[in-house]
Image: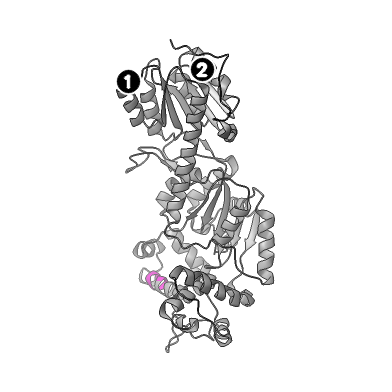
Amino acid sequence: MSQVVINNIGIDKNKVSGSKSLKNRSILVVDDEHGIRNFLIKGLSRYVGLVESAENIEEADKLEQRCHFDLIIADIKLPGKSGVEWVQQLRDSGTNASVIFITAHAHLNVAIEALRAGAADFIIKPFRMDQILAAINNCIERQEIRRENFVLRRQVDQIYENSNIVGDSQLMQNLFTTIKYVAPTPSTILIEGETGTGKELAAKSIHDLSERSGSFVPVNCGAIAADLLESELFGHAKGAFTGAHQRREGLFSYANDGTLFLDEIGEMPISMQAHLLRVLEEKSIRPVGSNKELPVNVRIIAATNKELGKLVEAGLFREDLYFRLNVLNLQIPPLRSRSTDLNLLVQHFIQTISANLGTKAPYIDESELVKLSQYHWPGNVRELKNVIERSLLLGTPPSECITGAKQNAHTIESDDNTSFLLADIEKKHILKVLKVHSGNKSAAARQLGVSRKTLERKVFLWGSKESAL
């Protein structure tokens, strides 16, 4: 039996100065030696928020099912089953806690076996408390780095404005004031506005102005297949479904202590809406294929370019979830409603895009700004940004880079009075397919490659005439 001196823990405070961050962490100690457990509980309780202990795997399983642990400290040799075998079973079931193995047997093959099981560290008995604390801090730091890297990888292909929202109109000043007011609160926020108005930028500004220490994690609910969305948000256990060869953390876990931005919330399937409502109420998630609840501390900011109230009336969106999301409501005005911001936005995009392209920022005269102000900007700020970038790349005035547009018109018409707006073309095509299938939405949805719910939502928002199909 290993001997540990308990009355002289011997902690070097300089080495564990980072342990203050452990106050909101939980640790499970699994060892059949009473002296080891007592030593670790006494030493760790001074720094860690919750420390539980078990002398065998049966006790550890009960604790692990009852409570979420950020980290497990386990002996390799345990009664009935090795710690390595037990941890491998936890991994397969979806448990993502970091593991530190402790052992009195310093054999190379034992260490290799532990590392293969996913151990974060391997410590030989007897040990000092500062060794354990240093290992714990390293584990927590690696967890945070992995989550940050995951979030950054998701944002690599996204064009994202790191600057503040641009605008000095009264509408935007009111929006800025509201953002500053609601940012420090933990409340759920619903952001509404047309496509391209900058809803994600507003959500990111709220996160940046909050005091949340975690990451800002954006997810487009309309861009993920319905059968994959649950796994994407909540994660899954190994073997949860065909192709789930290993466990995976969900976006809620990566956004822990931070903000999860659910864009296009109106596209979320009804079945997933029920799951999201439960998370908002219980503050915990359950990975697909797992029977364990994992606590999460995540602020939800949802956004939509749809009128959720109308979707609720049509039975396409849960009323209880709508009220739960709509605690605080932000309306992002379209560009046409704040035309006084156009000059400022044009200059902003010219400066930032020219810098990215490595070109000299051109001068835009007053007559050109007048032409731009006479356009309706159905794509809002995003369309303006694309027009400025196209202008800089082609070396032509921005007004000539509005694709197919007549600057004094609100829509783009051809000689035969056919609209070339993408939304109108989409609508015409969908109605044509519906007509081919005699109004059968299921058949039309299959041919269009979309879900029936998505088709019903689009038809409903076009009005009663098409809804009757």
- 432 within the magenta span: yes
- Image coordinates of residue 342 in percent, x first then y, are 59, 76
The answer to whether 376 appears left or right of 327 in the picture is: left
Which residue is depicted at the point 50% across and 72% down? 385
Magenta stretch prevailing secondary structure? helix
**The disc labelled 1 sits on which kind of residue?**
His
Check whether the beta carbons of the residues at disc 2 and disc 1 lie within 8 A of each other: no
**The disc labelled 2 sits on which kind of residue?**
Arg
- Residue, disc 2: 37
Which residue is depicted at the point 49% across and 49% down? 272
Q: Quadrant of residue 83?
A: top left
Q: Nearer the viewer, residue 267 or 159?
A: 159
Image coloring type: one colour
Res 323 seen here: yes
Q: Looking at the image, tell me whether mark 2 or mark 1 is earlier in sequence order.
A: 2
Q: Secondary structure at mark 2?
A: helix
Q: Quadrant of the N terminus?
A: top left
Q: Quadrant of residue 336?
A: bottom right
- Image coordinates of residue 165 in percent, x first then y, are 59, 65
Q: Nearer the viewer, residue 26 or 415?
A: 26
Which residue is depicted at the point 54% across and 64% down? 305
- Image coordinates of residue 43 in percent, x first then y, are 56, 22
In this picture, is 438 found above or below 419? above
- Mark identifier at residue 107: 1
In this picture, is 292 found above or below 154? above
- Mark identifier at residue 404: none
- 22 within the magenta span: no
Q: Nearer the viewer, residue 461 or 388?
A: 388
Q: Secondary structure at mark 1?
A: loop
Q: Quadrant of the C terminus?
A: bottom left
Magenta segment boundaries in residue numbering: 430-434
